[in-house]
Structure formats: structure tokens, C-alpha cells
Image (cartoon, rainbow, N blue to C red):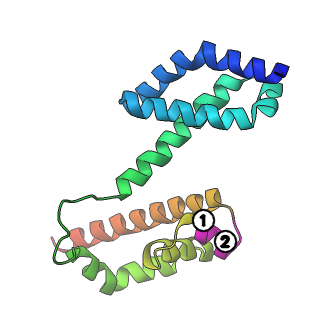
Amino acid sequence: MRDTDAAFDAFVVTRAPALLRYGYVLSGNPHDAADLAQEALARLGTAWSRVQRKGDPEGYVRTTMARLHISWWRRRRRESLVGEVPERGYADPGLDEVEVDPGLWRALADLPARQRAVLVLRYYELHTDEEIATLLGISRSTVRGYAFRALETLRASWQDRSRSTAGGAR
């Protein structure tokens, strides 16, 4: 057995109970906590020599557990399991209104080109952040930043428009 294997084993034995508690705090479920800890420790095992050199293996595992939990939570949130498949789809009545509202399209046209492209690709073409990043040649975090700023701008212009419409109706 190599020294790194012994060091990794010692880390797992000493820190596993604390990591399980951390996983429980994250997930609220002992089974999910065990899955989080196990997956994070498996990932630590493959990166042990690199992480050990940096000197904070517990920080690495806790960060990994938090990111895994967020990823699992997002995946579950998107899923909508039902006992029976609905016979007809859901239609959002507000969507038809937005589709034909010229004010929205004008506000969208006023956005900077990249922000507009991100919103159109995300909400109109239904692409993921990863796909948008590839299409535009930017990082996923830049995609999220552009989307955030663009939505803030649209919300502000929508609120201004609502105020002016309400003020004119008096």
C-alpha cells in the first residue's frame, strides 16, 4: 500500500461521519447524504494527490458535495413525475400575449446583441447554457451573466412601461 493510499484511507475514516452530517444538512435525507458523501469521496480518490498537495481535502469534498446536491436538485426539479400521462398539454395563456406584444420585441431589440442572442437562444429556441456557450463561443458563466443582465433590463423596461400605461389611464 502506498503512502497516498494510507493517507486517503485515514482521511475517509476520520472525516466520513462529519461529511455524512454535512450531506444530511444539505439534503435532509440520510440516504441522499450517504450518496453525496460517497460520490464526493470517490471523486476525491481520483484527485487525491492533487488535492492533498493543495492542503484542503475536506474543503474539496464539501464543495463537491454542495455542487452535486445542487446538480441533483436541479435535475429533480425539472422532472415532473405523474401517475398518469395527461391527455392534453399545458398551454400558458400569458405566453400567447407575450408572443404578439410588440413592446416586448422592441425592448428585446434594444438589448445589446449578445444579451439578446442569449435570451432568444435560451427562451425562444430552448437551448441549454452549454449549447448557447458553444454556439456563441463564450463560457457558460458568461451566458448566465448575459442572461441575468438582459432579464434585469427587460424587467426594468417592463416596469417603466407598466407605470406609464397606468399613469396614462388615470
Q: Residue furthest front?
A: 1
Q: Secondary structure at mark 1?
A: helix
Quarter of the image for residue 32 reads: top left
Mark yes or no: residue 111 visible. no
| Residue 118 or residue 160, whichever sits in front | 118
Residue kind at label 1, given as amino acid type: Glu
Residue 112 x %, y %: 59, 74
Instruction: Tell me the distance, in whole angstroms, between the alpha carbons under discs 1 and 2.
Output: 6 Å
Q: Which residues are magenta?
A: 130-138
Vertical arrangement, residue 96 with respect to residue 31, above or below? below
Residue kind at label 2, given as amino acid type: Thr
Residue that numbered label 1 is attached to: 130
Task: Assess whether residue 19 is covered by the magenta stretch.
Answer: no
Q: Main secondary structure of the magenta part?
A: helix
Quarter of the image for residue 139 reads: bottom right
- Placement of the C terminus among the 4 image quadrants: bottom left
From the viewer's perspective, tell me whether residue 111 is left or right of residue 168: right
Would you say the residues marked 1 and 2 are in contact, meaning their CB atoms lie under 8 Å apart?
yes
Residue 158 x %, y %: 36, 68
Vertical arrangement, residue 11 with respect to residue 99, above or below? above
Q: Secondary structure at mark 2?
A: helix
Q: What is the crowding at mark 2: few (fewer than 14 residues within 10 Å), some, or many (at least 20)?
A: few
Q: What is the crowding at mark 1: few (fewer than 14 residues within 10 Å), some, or many (at least 20)?
A: few
Quarter of the image for residue 46 reads: top right
**Residue at position x 45%, y 47% in the image:** 72
Residue that numbered label 2 is attached to: 134
Residue 119 x %, y %: 50, 72
Which label is found at residue 80? none
